[in-house]
Image: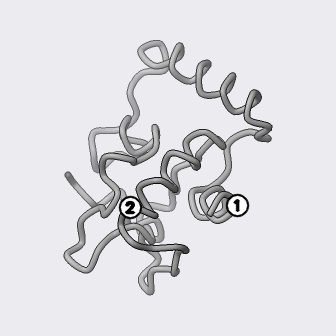
Amino acid sequence: MRTRCCHFRLTGKTPLLTRGEALFLAIGVRASGRKNLKPHPEGACPLLGRDGRCTVYAHRPFGCRTHFCEAAGGMYPRKHVADLIQRLEALDEKLGGDGSRPLEGALAAVL
């Protein structure tokens, strides 16, 4: 529930999503009543709510779940998540994806 990592302009990092992750995230976006994303004025994740918390927490992508940023403890060691990464990549291929893409672009493509 830490949101420092969600301030992409400050961290210089944005989570990358496969097509499967983007489709799952789109379910959360639609459930929150939105049909598209608006850029955050401060360069933060467009999925942060006015209260500064994630509006799609249950649907957040793998990178957000595994702490792609140092403020949340840093990345999980690859050996602990390699099987999950391989499964995401296989699903991406099956869904006709073309690899991981930055959150905003990946999500916009499926909304």
Separation of disc 1 and disc 2 at Cα? 17 Å
List x then y, in percent, for residue 30.
Answer: 45, 64
Secondary structure under tag 1 reads: helix
Q: Are marks 1 and 2 in contact (CB under 8 Å)?
A: no
Q: Quadrant of residue 6?
A: bottom left
Q: Nearer the viewer, residue 25 or 11?
A: 25
- The residue singled out by tag 1 in the image is 109
- Residue drawn 57% across the image and 57% down it: 103
Secondary structure under tag 2 reads: helix
Q: Give amino acid for label 2.
A: Ala
Residue 103 located left or right of residue 41: right
Counting residues from the start of the chain, the first of labels 1 and 2 encountered is: 2
- Residue drawn 39% across the image and 47% down it: 59
Residue 4 sits above or below residue 64 on the image: below
Residue 10 sits above or below residue 87 on the image: below
Q: Quadrant of residue 28?
A: bottom left
Q: Nearer the viewer, residue 108 or 31?
A: 31
Q: Residues within 10 Å of mark 1 (few under 14, many from 20)?
A: few
Q: Residues within 10 Å of mark 2 (few under 14, many from 20)?
A: few
List x then y, in percent, for residue 67.
Answer: 36, 40
List x then y, in percent, for residue 60.
Answer: 40, 48
Q: Nearer the viewer, residue 81 or 51?
A: 51
- The residue singled out by tag 2 in the image is 31
Which residue is the extreme one toward the bottom?
Answer: 41
Identify the image's colour scheme: rainbow, by chain, secondary structure or one colour: one colour
Q: Give amino acid for label 1.
A: Ala
- Residue drawn 50% across the image and 45% down it: 24
Q: Nearer the viewer, residue 76 or 91?
A: 91
Point out the frontmost of discs 1 and 2.
2
List x then y, in percent, for residue 61.
Answer: 46, 44
